[in-house]
Image: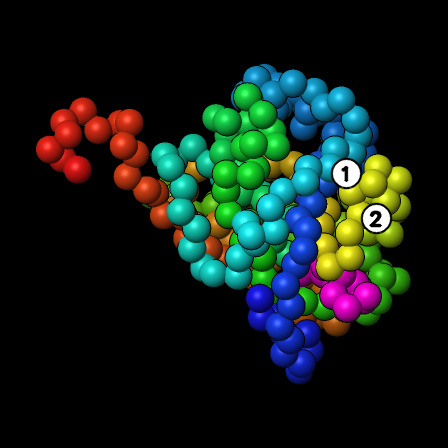
Amino acid sequence: MKFQIGKEKIEWKPKRLLIAGYTSKDQEQLQKHIKELEEELGVEPPPAIPMIYDLSPELLTTDEQISVVNNDSSGEAEVIAAEINGQWYIGIGSDHTDRKLESVSVQKSKQVCGKPITSELWPLASVESYWDEIEMKSWMVDKDGRHLYQSGKLNEFMKPEDLVNIIKERNYYSSDSVIFCGTLPLLSEGFIYGEQFIAELYDPIENRSITLHYDVHLLKDAEDIKNPKEV
C-alpha cells in the first residue's frame, strides 16, 4: 500500500488488522451504545471492554469504492493507528460493517466488508500532546442528500498508547499492524444506509485535516433474483 506522510511517500504492507470496539472513556455513553446495538440489531453485550477483533489485513484499502451485498451495511469513522518501521502514525478509516450479520457475529460482520483508510497519515508524536483536541466527523450520503452522522473529539477515547498496552496484554500485538481505535456515537436515531461515506480528522492546532471518502457499490444479490432469466 502507498502512503503519504508529510512530503514523503512510502510503500508499506500491513501484516495485521485489529478493530478495537467499545473504547469510549465515557462509560455512560458506552452503555448507551451497547444498548442501542442490542435493541436495534440484537447484538449481545460484549464479554469484555474493550473488545479486540482480529481481521484479515487484506481488507484494508485506500480505494474510493467498496462492494457489498444488499444495502444493509454502513461505515463508522475511526482513528487508525499504524506502526510502520517501528514508528506510529495516525489517519482515519471506516469500519464498514454488515449490520444484519452483526446480530449473528460481530467479528464476522466486520470481516465481510472492506476497510477503507486514508493514504495520508500524520506522525502520532506530532499530535500526541493535544490528542484530546483533535476532532472527528462523518457524513452519510443517500438519496435524500448528505447527513452529518458522527461528531466529536478524541478525548472520548482511550489514547493509542493505552490501547496498545491492552492489545499486548491480550497477545494480539504484532509489528506492522493497523489498529482501528473506536468510533463515535451516531447523531441519527439509527443507522443510515447510503451510497457514500465521508469522514474527516481535523487538527485545530495546526489547522489541517485528513479526509476519507468512498462509494458503496451494491453487488447483484443472486438469492434475491426471482426470475433466473434476469441474471
Q: Position of residue 12 (x, y in %)?
A: 64, 68
- Labels 2, 1: front one: 2
The answer to whether 169 appears left or right of 50 in the picture is right
**Start-end of magenta stretch:** 79-91
Viewer-side residue, 180 vs 29: 180
- Where residue 62 appears, as percent x and y from the top left, is 53, 61
Which label sits on residue 164? 2
Is the stretch drawn in magenta largely helix, strand or loop?
Answer: strand
Residue 155 in the image: x percent, y percent? 80, 48
- Asked if labels 1 and 2 touch by Cβ distance under 8 angstroms, the answer is no
Q: Residue furthest left?
A: 229
Q: Quadrant of residue 4?
A: bottom right
Q: Residue at x 30, y 34 (%)?
A: 221
Residue drawn 66% across the image and 49% down it: 17
Residue 23 badge: 1
Quadrant for residue 211, please give it: bottom right
